[in-house]
Amino acid sequence: MRHFLLYFILGCCFLSACNKEDCCTDATTRLISKSTTIRYRGFSTGKSITYYQGEKPQIDSVFYIYDDSPDLFLGKTQWLYNEEGLVEKIIRSNPNQVNDFITDILYDTSQRISFISKSDSDYSELFTYNDLSISKNRQNPQGNTIFTTYYELDENNHVMSALGSTGTQAVTVEYLNNDIFKFNRTQESIQTFHYLDTSTVPLFMKHPEFGEHLANYILFQSGLYVSSHLNTGQRFLSSVTSEYAGTASDYLSYTYEFNDDLLPIYIRKNYISSDSFDEWYYEYE
């Protein structure tokens, strides 16, 4: 059970509170730490504290929270960077300081992700670029391709769609002024994104640890499985509505507190249909 909680909390903590883009405040926000709290349907509460340097994560400690006893330390994650400042290795260790999960990332000369391997998986991922498209080949230890995913990009390197080997188009994305507007998981399921009228996301919310190529974070997250993997957005989200088979409903709502420099000090993401939420507290120098 504790292993499940560790994987669930760490997976959620890799995702950001908002969507990001290439127009934001400068790199001098001097973020020190980000504290994340996750509650799923009123229970399984987890917390992580991520420490930053130069707008990039360095160490992340994960805890399980009890209402009537001290927090339980579940492990930590370390980000290691190459000479270009791109994350090249992510090491997760358990409470006994034993490494139990390692991700290795390679880049091409254009600082685009070219290879990903994970120690808990029996396959690796190889990426090939061709104009405005990307091929992701999932390979077994013998180097044989077992599955291919194709991504289409626009001229700004926004990921527009994902297409599986079978030819079935699983996901399409629409943008409006560089912000994600609609996320189509299937033809019947559509998410529409709404934003604060005047807001600009800071640099650390753009995942600068993966460089400037907008597709890198999506490729690291293994694709367009959920809309929060989209590395885009100049503004803060206010809400997300969902439409399924022609029936619309509220899906997410967001609450913010900003400091005098218009940097977020608190963000809460509420899941409308369940007693679930994510919270983020930010500390600056």
Image: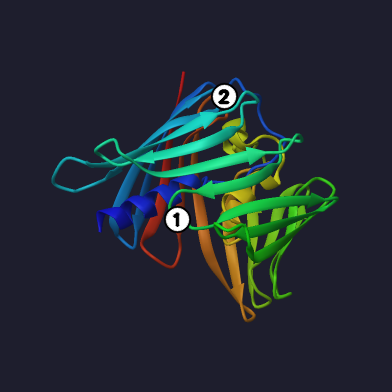
The residues bearing labels 2 and 1 have C-alpha atoms spaced at a distance of: 25 Å
Quarter of the figure with residue 167: bottom right
The residue identified by callout 2 is: 261
Left or right: 92 as drawn, with respect to 144: left
Q: Is residue 177 above or below residue 250?
A: above
> Which residue is farthest front?
142
Q: Which residue is mark 1?
A: 270
The vertical placement of 225 against 268, above or below, is below
Q: Nearer the viewer, residue 254 or 73?
A: 73
Q: Amino acid at mark 2?
A: Asp
When asked about the image quadrant of residue 172, the answer is: bottom right
Question: Mark 2 vs mark 1: which is more N-terminal?
Answer: 2
Q: Give the structural element (helix, strand or loop) at label 1.
A: strand
Residue 32 appears in the picture as rendered: yes
Residue at image point 45% right, 60% down = 271
Between 55 and 176, the residue placed more toward the observer is 55
The quarter of the picture where residue 96 lies is: top left
Residue lying furthest left in this view? 68
Front residue of 237/164: it is 164
Q: Amino acid at mark 1?
A: Asn
Residue 276 in the image, given as x and y percentages of width and height: 38, 59
Q: Position of residue 147 (x, y in %)?
A: 64, 66
